Amino acid sequence: MIRVEALSKSFAGRPAVDALQFEVAPGEIFGYLGPNGAGKTTTQRLLMGLLKPTGGRASIGGLDIVERSLDVRRITGFMPDTPFLYEFMTARQFLGFVAEVHELSPREAVGAVVPLLERFELAGRLDSRLSGYSWGMTKKLTLAALLVARPKVLLLDEPTTGMDPRSVRVMKDLIRDLAQSGCTVLLSTHTLSVAEELCHRVAILRQGRIIAVGSPTELRTQAGAAGRDLESVFLQLTAEESSSAGAPVPAGA
Ligand SMILES: Nc1ncnc2c1ncn2[C@@H]1O[C@H](COP(=O)(O)OP(=O)(O)OP(=O)(O)O)[C@@H](O)[C@H]1O
Ligand SMILES: [Mg+2]
């Protein structure tokens, strides 16, 4: 469903992502992990057509991300790490507005996401202005708004950051349900337990390159860390890369 081939993006000659290569199957939950600045957000912005690649190509649902950018956006929902909402609107108005953009009936579209808002304990705030929404509330509403258009693909940039534990659980259950009904999910996260629990496969990025890809179990085996958690694998792989890249050896080593 998502196909990325030698995809690269440089800013002022400095590569942010470099020759990325991966595929995500329909209904798969693909985790995208890596230290700060590794290129996770850049990849998602490229796929969404918000940035232009400097090399390579990618497609979503067979649609080229550059040539068919508008069609890609019709089937893809993107949740940025810092969501933006129109603060002067109420949640109901905002969801209705999103429905109209997608040429759907606002009443039905809002009705369709009310059960999710109930699970997120937001249904009672439907008529409150968004200027009064907290960070976590904003993220939850952003996700509900994405689902209004019934996307085939979801790109989620750190979806659980800033959410309370109950909402994280709702989010995880929801992502699992969506994938089971055929939605393809690419999610970046720093919460390795979320990746471990949720993702069929994960890619680990460092300095714009994918250094490992596989199921959490495969990565543990690959890193010789069978029986340990994904956090140990992540720390080991990203540390190995930095030493092979010529990082200084710690004093006393
Ligand atoms: N608009 C931009 N202009 C210049 N450099 C950029 C721009 N956007 C990203 N970069 C650079 O590209 C690299 C990758 O950044 P990116 O935001 O993709 O990282 P990330 O993996 O999402 O990190 P984080 O975990 O902190 O969110 C970084 O070196 C960053 O400084
Ligand atoms: Mg980021």
Image (tube, grey):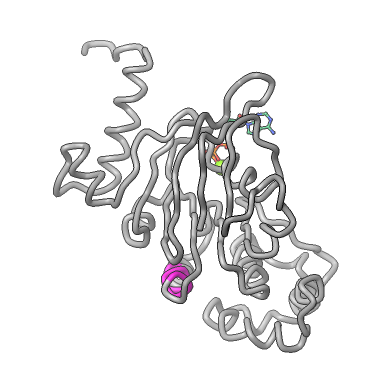
Residue sitting at the far right: 88
- Asked whether 117 falls inside the magenta stretch, the response is no
Residue at position x 37%, y 55% from top? 195
Residue located 71% across and 52% down the image: 68
Residue at 66% over, 84% down: 124
Query: In the rendered view, would you say 143 is above or below 15?
Result: below
Q: Which residues are magenta?
A: 172-179
Q: Position of residue 207 (x, y in %)?
A: 48, 28
Indicate the quadrant containing the C terminus: top left, top right, bottom left or bottom right. Answer: top left
Residue 196, position as x, y percentages in the image: 32, 55
Ligand 1 image position (quadrant): top right
In the rendering, at what x and y percent does residue 248 appear? 35, 11
Q: Which quadrant would residue 129 be assigned to in this image? A: bottom right
Residue at x 32%, y 61% (from the top left corner) = 197
Q: Position of residue 175 (x, y in %)?
A: 46, 68
Question: Which one is nearer the viewer's eye here, 143 or 14?
Answer: 14
**What secondary structure predominates along the stretch shown in magenta?**
helix
Q: Is residue 226 left or right of residue 35?
A: left
105 and 240: which is toward the camera: 105
In the figure, 110 relative to 10: above or below? Answer: below
Q: How many marks?
A: 0
Considering only vertical position in the picture, is 111 above or below 202?
Answer: below
Please state if 204 lies on the left or on the right of 118 as rendered. Answer: left
Towards the viewer: 46 or 197: 46
Q: Nearer the viewer, residue 59 or 95?
A: 59
Compared to residue 49, the image places residue 88 above or below, namely: below
